[in-house]
Image: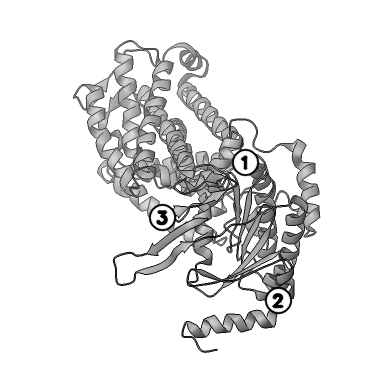
């Protein structure tokens, strides 16, 4: 039983942190209809920036904020490549992802791993420390839940503002945005900034939870995030009581649980990425087979 | 529009010189209907006026504002356009209310204030009631669930919600069934009269071209072959128009 609780704790903590990224990818992929591959680069960017800042004695919360801004800047780069230079969406993402590899190395000062086990993070100082004393082993999971809830609420609220409505229109019918006298390209850039900002924030929080920043941590993040979004919106999207962002959070936890379950059943760690790819494929195929047949357009981003 | 020249695919085998020194002036408050065979340049005129096609030379201005070279989204601030495709003028995934709220905010900042203002809902409802299509009860439904005629009526309403200098109707009834197309056309006429809009309408329906508007233009190979206004237009019947149409059609090598 203890083993099971421990696993559940692990699934919830990591699942909720990854959910922050999945919410960001939901904005780019489902709302904007933009398959953004730069996520593979912005996730470790958040981790590396956080590692570098904390090792220099920065406040861990400030490190989270700076990570978000760095991610947003990377998303802006993807958007500019796509909108201003007319490079296709997939290629723009690949270009930024490739370029970020060097940027991340520059941030870490050339090493692949930055360890800061003994330095203060959001998990072992201030509010996080208080939570850990109060809730014991479940402290980190609670803190992850708070982070995730804050991001989810912020994104939900944003999508209901005038700017958010325009963002949803830009993904749905760019011509409509043009006829409103606005440039849909700018809305795409804004959406990519939000998406990659959230991704870098997730990278930052996860790195603080583990006490180290790993430059390799980005591999497979696109697959993981997209799978979470698709699993979430297909499994839970039809429940009227749930907003799409909540569905995405649940999807991430389900996805993470599948991975952990496979590990417990004896799958060697080396096959993890293969399993991620297979799960993603299954999610894609299942969504096509879904009776509603309306694809991702079916998802009502916020049910007002 | 003055001295417009436009050649498509210049320098290739499929070079199509469409306009050579084309001129057209619309009076403020006039409602002009344009007919013509395929490839006569009707849609190109609309595209130049909207900024989606740039002429090789010449000038085009709307209400004194030069528009050649201006990006499409800037021109949209004072030129409204209803498309042939009913899906183009609205946002299918958003609800009727959200679509109207966006349109209502045109020309203002799209900031972080609430996207849908409940205070304005009654105003939207009264506007929708005027359409007499029962849309006032469907405010919270996504536009994707509306019929083509309802969507086109909504697109029209969205276009004229904020003041515009020129309304462009791009075969806006062509994709609808005869009954809805009749309804949308009557609606168009009523809105245009009420708001005293300047309108340029392209249509393939000669009956609408004769029945609506105060000026009729027939185009052929980038030239205006018939331009009737006021009394002269009223004297035109569908029959004489069809004859004229067949004439240019024959000239183009088609059999009647």
Quadrant location of the C terminus of chain B in the rendered image: bottom right
Q: Residue at x 71, y 36 (%)?
A: B117
Image x and y of residue A36, in percent: 38, 44
Q: Are marks 3 and 2 in contact (CB under 8 Å)?
A: no
- Residue that label 1 marks: B106
Of labels 3 and 2, earlier in sequence is 3
Element type where label 2 sits in the image = loop
- Residue that label 3 marks: B57
Of labels 3 and 1, earlier in sequence is 3
Image x and y of residue A27, in percent: 49, 41
Chain name for mark 2? B
**Is residue B193 among what the camera can see?**
yes
Q: Nearer the viewer, residue A165 or B29?
A: B29
Question: Can you say whether A288 is above or below B78 in the image?
Answer: below
Chain name for mark 3? B
Q: Residue at x 49, y 83 (%)?
A: B251
Image x and y of residue B148, in percent: 65, 64
């Amino acid at each position: 039983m203890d083993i099971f609780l421990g696993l559940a704790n692990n699934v919830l903590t990591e699942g909720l942190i990854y959910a922050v990224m999945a919410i960001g990818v939901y904005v780019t992929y489902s709302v904007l209809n933009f398959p953004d591959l730069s996520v593979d680069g912005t996730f470790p960017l958040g981790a590396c920036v956080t590692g570098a800042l904390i090792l220099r004695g920065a406040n861990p919360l400030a490190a989270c904020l700076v990570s978000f801004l760095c991610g947003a800047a990377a998303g802006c780069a993807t958007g500019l490549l796509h909108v201003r230079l007319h490079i296709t969406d997939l290629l723009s993402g690949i270009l930024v992802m490739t370029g970020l590899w060097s940027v991340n190395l520059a941030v870490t000062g050339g090493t692949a791993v930055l360890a800061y086990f003994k330095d203060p993070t959001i998990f072992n100082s201030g509010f996080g420390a208080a939570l850990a004393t109060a809730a014991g082993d479940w402290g980190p999971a609670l803190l992850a839940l708070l982070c995730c809830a804050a991001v989810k609420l912020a994104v939900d609220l944003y999508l209901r503002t005038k700017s958010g409505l325009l963002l949803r229109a830009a993904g749905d019918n760019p011509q409509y945005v043009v006829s409103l006298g606005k440039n849909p390209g700018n809305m795409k850039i804004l959406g990519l900034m939000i998406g990659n900002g959230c991704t870098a924030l997730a990278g930052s929080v996860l790195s603080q939870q583990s006490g180290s920043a790993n430059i390799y941590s980005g591999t497979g993040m696109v697959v993981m995030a997209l799978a979470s979004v698709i699993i979430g919106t297909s499994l839970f999207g039809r429940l009227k009581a749930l907003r799409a962002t909540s569905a995405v959070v649940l999807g991430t936890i389900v996805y993470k649980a599948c991975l952990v379950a496979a590990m417990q059943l004896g799958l060697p760690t080396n096959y993890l990425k293969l399993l991620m790819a297979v799960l993603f494929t299954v999610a894609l195929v299942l969504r096509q087979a879904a009776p509603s047949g309306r694809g991702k357009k079916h998802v009502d981003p916020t049910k007002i | 529009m003055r001295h417009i020249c436009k050649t498509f695919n210049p320098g290739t085998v499929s070079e199509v010189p469409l306009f050579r020194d084309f001129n057209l002036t619309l009076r403020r408050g006039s409602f002009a209907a344009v007919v013509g065979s395929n490839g006569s340049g009707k849609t190109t005129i609309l595209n130049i006026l909207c900024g989606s096609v740039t002429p090789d030379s010449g000038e085009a201005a709307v209400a004194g504002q030069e528009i050649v070279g201006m990006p499409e989204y800037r021109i949209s601030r004072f030129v409204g356009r209803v498309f042939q495709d009913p899906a183009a003028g609205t946002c299918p995934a958003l609800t009727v209310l959200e679509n109207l709220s966006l349109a209502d905010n045109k020309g203002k900042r799209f900031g972080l204030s609430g996207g849908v203002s409940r205070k304005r809902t009654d105003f939207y409802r009264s506007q929708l009631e005027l359409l007499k299509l029962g849309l006032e009860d469907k405010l919270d439904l996504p536009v994707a669930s509306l019929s083509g005629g309802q969507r086109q009526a909504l697109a029209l309403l969205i276009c004229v919600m904020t003041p515009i200098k020129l309304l462009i109707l791009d075969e806006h009834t062509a994709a609808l069934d005869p009954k809805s197309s009749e309804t949308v056309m009557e609606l168009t006429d009523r809105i245009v009269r009420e708001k005293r809009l300047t309108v340029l309408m392209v249509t393939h329906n000669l009956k609408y071209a004769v029945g609506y508007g105060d000026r009729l233009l027939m185009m052929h190979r980038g030239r205006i072959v018939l331009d009737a206004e006021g009394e002269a237009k009223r004297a035109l019947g569908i029959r004489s128009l069809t004859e004229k149409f067949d004439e240019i059609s024959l000239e183009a090598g088609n059999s009647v």
